[in-house]
Amino acid sequence: MMKNESTQKDKFNNIKEEEDVTLPNEQSDYHYSFLQRYSVELKKDLLNWYYKYRRKLPWRGDEPPFTTSVQLYENKKQVDIRCFFGNHKRDEIKIKNSKSDNVKNNEKIKGTKIMKIKKEHNELSLERCKRLKKEDKDEEKKYNSLSDSLKSENIKSLHDKINNNNNNNNDDDVVDKNNCNSSLLVHKEEKKHNFINNLMYDKEHLSTKGYQIYISEIMLQQTKVHTVLNFYLKWMNKWNNIFDLAKCNLDDVLILWKGLGYYNRAKNLLECCKIVVDKYNGIFPNDLKLLKTLPGIGDYTSKAICIHLYNRKDICIDTNIIRIFSRITDTINYYNSGTLLKHCEKVSEILCSGESNYSDLSQAFMDLGSSVCNNSPDCSQCPINKYCMIYLKSNKKKQHNLFNTKHPEHCNLCVNDRN
């Protein structure tokens, strides 16, 4: 009896283990397989869209004029103001382009010239045409003979120069051996000098770029881009680098921060910059753990610094990114869901496989979430709609042939009472 009970318990435990294993596999087959297959194409299409329509901002290294919204509709046809007056229909009237008119006029002039030349040729007598052809042939023969003679002369002169150079080199071998050591030393010194200059440039670049990224990330916490822009420009005019800011008092910082709110951010910002100057020579470290030890830096800001400064293979996950990831993988977007966050981290792992510009990719997702894939999405304008599972489900005509996986009944991501 005891043996039978133990065997039954073992069987029951094995069934439980099998259930635990199969559920995640079913989940991954449905929610991740389509993304895994087309992750490279998705990234490519999204980045192409980003480079065409992206927001131009100073902390992204752009020059003015800056844009705080995605420029999606800049290439639309311009409507003539006359269509808004009168009883007629408001049809779009094409504005005359001076360039196109000029091109047409030039083509007409060229056409008339060609016609005149043809007429002149027709008026010429046959005998005159034959003479002209003979003259052309004679000129070609003369030119060919001259070119052949010039070629032979050039070859001879080149041979003579090579022989002279060889003789000179043999004479100068002794001098070169004596000066060899000195030239090598000079070359080594030049290499060292260039290497030091490059290192200094890299350090300055990392320091200034890291500082710009950090200031923008702290200012953008719970604050919109169009309000941050003016504050950021004023800030950079006063404290251009992290070393200047580290010398300042808190009162000076708070005066410039006035209007942004959440003044504890300004206090932590100043303390953080002072620590970075003292400990890391003004360069933010490429380490998430070290960054999290700094005041006011959490998971999101530490990831943002590493992604945008060191091109870390990762994506900053916020509410916009969660919305996009839940749509492209067909999961229910619950507010403040721990399982959904883990799911989004796995999606970012899939997208961050292989070489790419992950700083631009992260910003591309942000721009997409703020413009197209927002709370009221414009799916027709989305650059990644052909890789979005929810879009493909809603449009049966546009469903992909390979989109055949069925949704499992017991899916951890799609449980209604999940949180």
Image: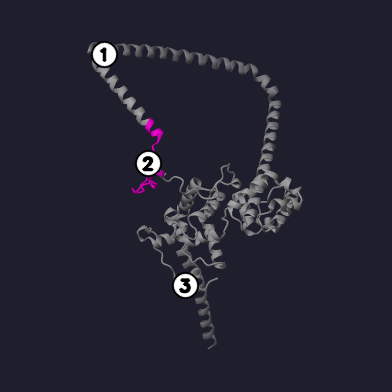
- Pointer 1 residue: 129
Q: Amino acid at mark 2?
A: Lys
- Asked whether residue 281 is in view, the answer is no
CB within 8 Å, label 3 to label 2: no
- Asked whether residue 228 is in view, the answer is yes
Spatial CA span between label 1 and label 2? 50 Å
| Vertical position of residue 36 compared to residue 336: above or below | above
| Vertical position of residue 328 compared to residue 14: above or below | above
Q: Amino acid at mark 1?
A: Cys
| Quarter of the image where the C terminus is located | bottom right
The reply, left or right, for residue 297 in relation to residue 155 is right
How far across and down, in percent of the image, does residue 292 sit?
A: 68, 58
Range drawn in magenta: 81-102
Compare residues 249 and 47 and report the one nearer the observer: 249
Q: Quadrant of residue 185?
A: top right
Which is more N-terminal, label 2 or label 3? 2
User: Is residue 367 in the magenta section?
Assistant: no
How far across and down, in percent of the image, does residue 278 sit?
A: 76, 50
Q: SS of the residue at dot 1?
A: helix
- Pointer 3 residue: 410
Crowding at dot 3, Cα within 10 Å, few <14 / some 14-19 / many 20+, comes out as few
